[in-house]
Amino acid sequence: MLAIYKKEMRSYFNSIIGWLFLGFFLLFVGLYHYLYNMYYGYANFAYALSGVYIFFILLVPMLTMRIMAEENKQKTDQLLFTSPISITKIIVGKFLALISIFGIGILIICIYPLSLSRYGTVNMKWSYAAIMGFFLLGAAYMAIGLFISSMTESQALAAVLTFITVIVTLFVDGIASILPTDNKTAWLFFAVVALLITLITYLLMKNVVVSGTIAVVLEAALAVLYFVHPAFYDGLIVKVFGWFSVIARYDDFSNGVLNISDVVYYLSVITLFVFLTIQSIKKRRWS
């Protein structure tokens, strides 16, 4: 795993990608730091970070688009995945390289609250809680981008899909606010979701029996629940969309609140998408 990690770190800094990412990241943070903290005089670095996360739309695809797609395109993945190193260690090594690049930027911006303290009183706990949440938010997006990159051979397609995914998660709260809240619509919505889950299962396993069984069980369970306890579906779509709101979890950090449930949420998202990446690669390896 250490060899994979070193290889990825070298590739980022031997090419322009790693430098571009850090350059743009520090540019955006520095700009908002100047506007909020220096120009307007807010003695809280969390205000600067609250305006920066929108740029994850550009930064995350820039860093993650090549991490797996390039291996797939050049067919070097076949050499990599037939090596004695386990797939899990390979993927974890690549992911650690991603968050290390991001972590370098985070370590640099940790200096900003200290510099502000020279000019007045700064709430350090609030500022560093926001930085911690910002790092977890970025790491979650990196894990999502890693998974998307593993599904394609095209860096451009990986970048576009990651770009779209980040946009959806940024505006999911607004999308949820216009969705219907009645129980019948929610039942139909989750019935369609169950079919999509079945389709994904089939694409991963190529097993009609298993996929069909999952479809029948899910659809039957949803139908029984609707007729037995329809109130369960009231507002459920909004609640589920709220769970996918990665940004909403950052609000506590930006307000200086270190909520363990938010930390667990981000770690769960990271673990889930790293796991899905591993399973995606394993499927390709044995197909």
Image (cartoon, rainbow, N blue to C red):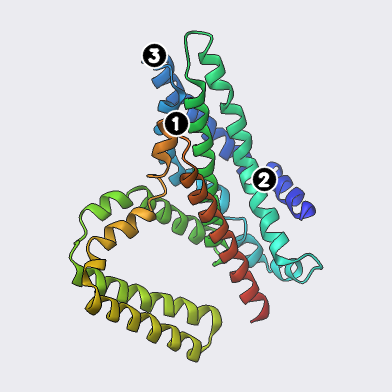
Looking at the image, do the residues carrying marks 3 and 2 touch, with CB atoms under 8 Å apart? no
Q: Position of residue 6 (x, y in %)?
A: 76, 48
Secondary structure found at label 2: helix
The residue nearer to you, when weighing 43 against 65, is 43
Height in image: 278 above or below 264?
Answer: below
What is the distance, in whole Å, between disc 3 and disc 2 at their CAs?
Answer: 36 Å
Height in image: 151 above or below 248?
Answer: below
The tag earlier along the polypeptide, 3 or 2, is 2
Disc on res. 124: none
Q: Which residue is mark 2?
A: 12
Secondary structure found at label 3: loop
Secondary structure found at label 1: helix
Disc on res. 41: 3
The residue nearer to you, when weighing 252 against 175, is 252
Label 1 environment density (alpha carbons within 10 Å; few <14, some 14–19, many ≥20): many
Q: Which residue is mark 1?
A: 49
Q: Is residue 101 visible to the viewer in this orientation of the structure?
A: yes
What is the distance, in whole Å, between disc 1 and disc 2 at their CAs?
Answer: 25 Å
Q: Amino acid at mark 2?
A: Tyr
What is the distance, in whole Å, between disc 3 and disc 1 at their CAs?
Answer: 15 Å
Q: Residue at x 43, y 52 (%)?
A: 163
The tag earlier along the polypeptide, 3 or 1, is 3
Q: Position of residue 99 (x, y in %)?
A: 61, 45
